Image (spheres, rainbow, N blue to C red):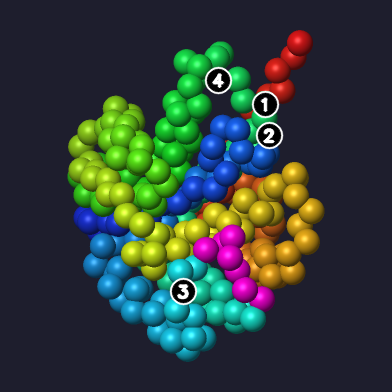
Amino acid sequence: MDNLSQIQSYKIFCDESCHLENDPSNVMVLGALCCPESTVSLLNRKIKFLRHKHNYMTELKWTKLLSKQSAFYKDLLDLYLNAEELHFKATVVVNKNYLDHDEFNQGSHNNFYYKMFFYALRDFINSGSTYKIYLDYMDTHGRDKAVKLMEVLHNSNYGSAKTEAYIIRSHESQLIQLCDLLIGALSYANREDIDHESRIKNEIVAYLEKKLCRPLIVGTPPWEDKFNIFRFSPRRKMC
């Protein structure tokens, strides 16, 4: 992205939703929130200010949204939308049950996972720049995933960009928690296997869609660099 390439050092905060092969969701969402490294400290202070303003001191997780904190979530979304230095990109896999790993991914869901995460990160990586990529701790295999993801980026013509991956716990990062809010809204809007009965989640999805002036269930053009959605839909296997 041209407006990102002027800065040489970035941090990218990543999170994922419904990424396991056999979970009940029909979608998988992998998201990345990117900003110049020099802006992270100020962004953290702004988020902490909002936390104190709304007396929200616990970890922010989409799965634990509180109706009484609607104003805090909206203020946080406004902070993101108004911050020119923040850019978000997500890969949304729909119809996950149609995936054919034997034919396309050497029989491995992990191979597919890395391919999709590559799509979430590729537009942020520019030759000659350095990137610190933060991944939310999920399980004991996180370190192996981080190493593999760096290999994928390096082997995809990004060898001239310096990338390092770090595994951190989400409560340690304000920006990973913000990424969790964004991908949570995306996942919730795109899921067809749930009843969408949560008032607060519907409210946040509607607020974000209104601010973006578009629904969260459609992809965006490749040049959209504020809130970019890449949708991947596997074809149903014919018998």
Determine which residue is flagged by label 3. Answer: 58
Q: Position of 3 compared to 72: left or right?
A: left
Q: Nearer the viewer, mark 1 or mark 3?
A: 3
Instruction: List x then y, in percent, for residue 65.
Output: 60, 69
- Separation of residues labelled 1 and 3 (CA atoms): 37 Å
For disc 4, the marked residue is: 101
Please, what secondary structure does the residue beneath circle 4 have?
helix
Residue 142 in the image: state x and y as whole percent. Answer: 35, 41
Closer to the eye: label 3 or 4: 3
- Disc 4 residue type (three-letter): His
According to the picture, the residue beneath numbered tag 1 turns out to be 98
Instruction: Tell whether 197 sits left or right of 235.
Output: right
Quarter of the image for residue 21 reads: top right
Q: Position of residue 11 (x, y in %)?
A: 30, 57
Magenta region, residue range:
61-67
| Amino acid type, callout 2 | Asn
Q: Which residue is at 56% across, 74% downward?
A: 73
Q: Estimate the spatial distance between the alpha carbons at disc 2 and disc 4, rounded to whole Å.
A: 14 Å
Compare residues 136 and 224 and report the one nearer the observer.
136
- Depicted 224 relative to depicted 60: above or below: above
Q: Earlier in the sequence, mark 3 or mark 4?
A: 3
Badge 4 local density, few (<14 within 10 Å), some, or many (20+)?
A: some
Query: Disc 2 on helix, strand or loop?
Result: loop
Residue 65 magenta-highlighted: yes
Which residue type carries mark 1?
Tyr
Q: Give whichever of 228, 51 is nearer the camera.
A: 51
- The residue wearing badge 2 is 95
Q: Tell me the CA gap for discs 2 and 1.
A: 6 Å
Tag 3: amino acid: Thr
